[in-house]
Structures are given as structure tokens and as C-alpha cells.
Image: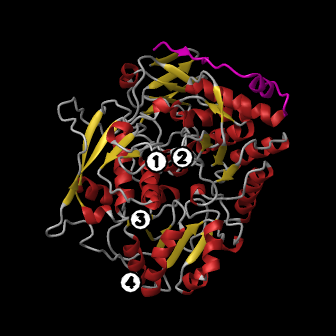
Amino acid sequence: METKMSHGRLRLSGRDEAMLAGEMGEATQMAMRILVAMASVYDAESLLDIESAHIDGCLYHGYSGLEFAERLVAGGARVAVPTTLNVGAMDLIQPELFRGTEEFGQLATRLMQAYEAMGCRPTFTCAPYQAMHRPPLGAQIAWAESNAIVFANSVLGARTNRYGDFIDICCAITGRAPAVGLHLPENRAGQILFRLKDIPTHLLEQDVLFPVLGYWLGVQTGTKIPVIEGLLPHTTEDQLKALGATAASSGGVALFHAVGVTPEAPTLEAAFQGHTPEMIIEVTLEALKETRDILSTADGGPIDVVALGSPHFSLEEFTQLLPLVERFPPRPDIEFIVCTHRVILALLERRGWVERLRAAGIEIIVDTCVLGTPLLKTQDGVLMTSSGKFAHYSPGSISRDVVYGSLEECVRSAAAGEVWRNTGLWEINGDEQAASRQATDWSTRETLQASSEGGSATPDSDHILVPGEATGRALVLDKPLSLWGGLDPVTGDIVEQRHPQRDQNVAGRVLVMPVGKGSSSSSSILLEAVRRGTAPAAILLAEPDAILALGATVARELYGVAPPVVVLARESYNRIIDGETITVTAGEVILA
């Protein structure tokens, strides 16, 4: 399989050249060097100015991320645009709640402080859009953290690509980003139409629907842009937040349009920018019920923990929670945690709600979340949540079985000590008119069958994203994998509970998979795996994945070694057999 290395078509401004030459300091030079390498991965012709950045790399995944950040600090790095920080691995306001080792806590704190030293705002939230910073429609930004990305693009109409750990801070330091992808209006058109069919109107009002719908969309869509027809016009921001967060976890969704709801989709035609959908897919109640069940890895029965707030809980969500927990307080032996951020905590304190929530048995966490650091009192047991993101990642990230349910179901289950269900929530009421809205008739146009994986178009020829040489046995994955929550960088084991290749080990193997998915922290996990010697020897993909390429690019910057990352043509990809020996060398991928 002959390949050609792409050097890209990048044209730099005079200021870009000065940064790359080191005229603005070592850290800025390093940031621009990584940015230029990634611009080649994106095949960008130029860079553009950004107005803000949101950094995901401040969450501790291992020493490699700290080494990267402290090297920037030592080189004099300062952000050039307003920059917010995602969650860290410590609640710096309440450090006594941390239940990890002293060493972990110290390293996690150093990482958070390193990003503060670069001039980032210590917001420490995955939901900066709730209060700290809401970029306007059309604003060019460089945001990482999967839910923040999809919210900014979809709900606010700002423009960012799906950026991963490390390039986020490089964009913030340089004030620049590759002028490609979702930064360009012509690339923001919808691609797949999802029509809600026979969904009960009362269910469309319920928060519990949206993580389920998002999870289903992510699986079906992959990295394409879904357009949803049939949501109610008054669908709330929290509901859209939950939908996007879960779609970005089960797939690689960075932008969705909801007709009549989100700013770039006032009409169906506007959402597609006048184009015909590549696919038209009906979303049925039965499909959503099946997806709801997938989000739970435990059946009914006793629970040990309720965890809410991924993405971080908003003030409106606390407004719903407070009367429920005062009416149905959790049993003393049930741990009940809600994750939020400092701005919301301050609002709760001013209203006197913190005392009332704590009196009801609720622990409020800021700066972090239960997936990011040891916070839970027990090491095992069943966790119940209303968060699709918690439900998706908890089995792999913190080795917890999960039960997914509505907010009321979570509260009443905590009060009972076992799963409580509202049995009518997912049923069509007697004379209720189910929602099936079709504003535009495309029935006479070509409609394609949806694949189970979704994703972007496969290239016609092999393409090197990150060069290098490697030999190893192929490990062919049937489905995409998010390295964060899906791969243990300490061992190299696949830990995503729902993945068909769970418990396989990637260390030294040539990892072959359709594309990555989910978390923008996958770049951090790959970097840490390289540091520990548990990384794949090479990564072969059917579709480009900039986040995996980013992890390899930064590994080469820090350690001088990295797994090559290559996108194969469909014919080449389909020829690979699990277990066969593959050699990746300059310009070639050779099968044994």
C-alpha cells in the first residue's frame, strides 16, 4: 500500500513566522511548532485569529501532561486571548474531599496551577458557557472538552473544531487556529436528517430524553453533522447541553442542528444550507428505549451512589433538584454527589441553598467531577445518574456499574436505597398525540440507509497524518474507541465496558479502527501511554482523527518518538486481518 506524506499547503503570516522562529519566546515557538504540525494534519491553507479558548488539558491523566504544561511555563508561556479552564482533578475549594494518594493530589494541583500561571482563568468547569464566557454567534474560538465544543458550535453558533488536549493551549498562546473545518461556514451544513417519529409529546418535555437521544445520534452519526427535526421550540439549553454531551461521547459529534431551536437552523433548508441530506433516518420510540437500556450496565436493585452533573449542573438544574431532595432525602448510607462550578456555587450560597442541600444529604463538588479524580467513599458498587456522559464513561473510567434514569428517579432511588422507576415516563399516554413532524418533504429524493457507525467520507488513497516507522501485529477493532474512558494508559488494556474488544491490550500492536470518538482527552491518554511504553506501535484508521494525531504529535515533541498515524483507503483498510504482522515505514504500509 503506497502512501504519500502530506506537507500541507499552509501559508503563514509574518507574525506566525516570527512565533515559529522563536522571536516571541521558547514557549510560543513550541506552541506554534505543534500548531503548524497539526495544520498539516488538517490540510489547512492558513491560520485564523481566535477570540477565546477553553482548555481541557488541565485534568491530570499522568505525568506527561504535567511535563508538557510545565515546559510551556518554563518557556514563558502566556495566553493571548481570554482562556477558561476545564475541570481539574482536584476540588481546590474543598481539598478535604479528595480521596486519592498524596502524590496524585500534588501532581494534579501542580497541573492546574501551571495553566493558571499561563494566564488562564481558574474556572475549572466543563460548562464555561453557563456563566463565564458565552461567545457570540459566528465567533472564532478554539475550545476543547467534547461537550463544550458541541455546545459552543450548536447552541451558541460559535465556530470551533473538535480540539483536543494540547492544541487548545497552543491556540490560546498564539491566538491562532487552523482555518479549516467548522471554522468555515460552508462546512457547517447538516449532513444527516433525523426525524422524530411517534415520540410522545410529554417525553419531549422531559430532561431524561435528551441524553438518550444524544447517545443514539452519536452512534449513528459518528463525526458527521446531524440535523434533528421534531424537537419542541422551547427545548431548553440544559436539554440541548445533555443531548450534545452524550452525542459527543458515543460518537464524535462536534455540531448538531435542531430545526427551529438552534441558531443556524431556523428552517430545515437553512440547516442543510440548501443541500439534500446524505441520509434521512427516522428516530422511533423503540430505538430510544433500546438506547436507554444500553446506558445502564446494572439492572434494578440496590444502589450505592447517585452522581449528577456531567456536564456541570446549572442553576436551573439545582432549582429542580432542591424540592425533590427535600421531599425525598437520600438514605444516610447512599452517597449523593452533585458536580458544578464556582459561579453556580456562589449563586447557591447567596440564595441559602447550599445549607439546605447539605442538610438534605447532598455533597456539592466544584472544580472537578467523579470521573476525573477519586472522590467516592466506596471503591465499588452501583452508581445511578441522570447524566448520559457519566453513564457512558463510568464503567471504564472508575469501574462502576451504572443505572441511568431521570432526575426524579435518581432522587427517589437514593431515598429508597434501590432503583425506583417512573413506569409511565417512556410510554404513550392514552389519547396523546405523538410527535412526528416533517416540515419538508424529501420523500422523492434519494434516501440512504444509515450505517451503524456513521462517520466521515473515507479517503481514496492512503494518507500519513503522523510519520514514523513501526512493526507489530494488527489489533482490528470493530468499533471506534475513545482512549479516555476506553483505554488504561498504565496497562494498555481496553476498558470500555460496552466495546466488543474490551480487555484486549494495545501495547506494541498496530491498532486498526474506523476512527476515534468521544473525549478530547484521548490525546492526553495516548501521550501518557507513549511515556509508559503501553501505546500502540502504530495507529491505522479508516477516517482522519485529529485528536489521535495530536497525541502522537505532542509525543514526538516531548519524547522524540510517537506511533505513526495513517489513514488508509477503504480497499487497504478492508484487507487488514486481525493478528497479521504490519510494518509501517516511510511512505508504505506493508502487510505480511
Say above or below: 115 vs 348.
above
Say above or below: 64 vs 333.
above
Q: Residues within 10 Å of mark 3 (few under 14, many from 20)?
A: many
Q: Position of residue 563 (x, y in %)?
A: 59, 30
Q: Report how far apart the C-alphas of labels 2 and 1 lie in the structure.
A: 9 Å
Q: Mark 2 or mark 3: which is in front?
A: 2
Q: Earlier in the sequence, mark 2 or mark 4?
A: 2
Residue under label 1, please give it: 248
Q: Quadrant of the N terminus?
A: top left
Q: Position of residue 64 (x, y in %)?
A: 70, 45
Q: Mark 1 or mark 4: which is in front?
A: 1
The amino acid pointed to by label 2 is Ile
Q: Earlier in the sequence, mark 2 or mark 3?
A: 2
How many numbered markers are drawn?
Answer: 4
Is residue 230 on the magenta stretch? no
The amino acid pointed to by label 1 is Ala
Residue under label 4, please give it: 416
Q: Residues within 10 Å of mark 1 (few under 14, many from 20)?
A: many
Residue under label 3, please give it: 402
- Give the residues drawn in magenta, as a range: 1-25
* Residue 47 seen anywhere in this rendered image of the structure: yes
* Residue 500 seen anywhere in this rendered image of the structure: no
Q: Mark 2 or mark 4: which is in front?
A: 2
Residue under label 2, please give it: 149
The amino acid pointed to by label 3 is Val
Contact, CB < 8 Å: mark 3 with mark 4?
A: no
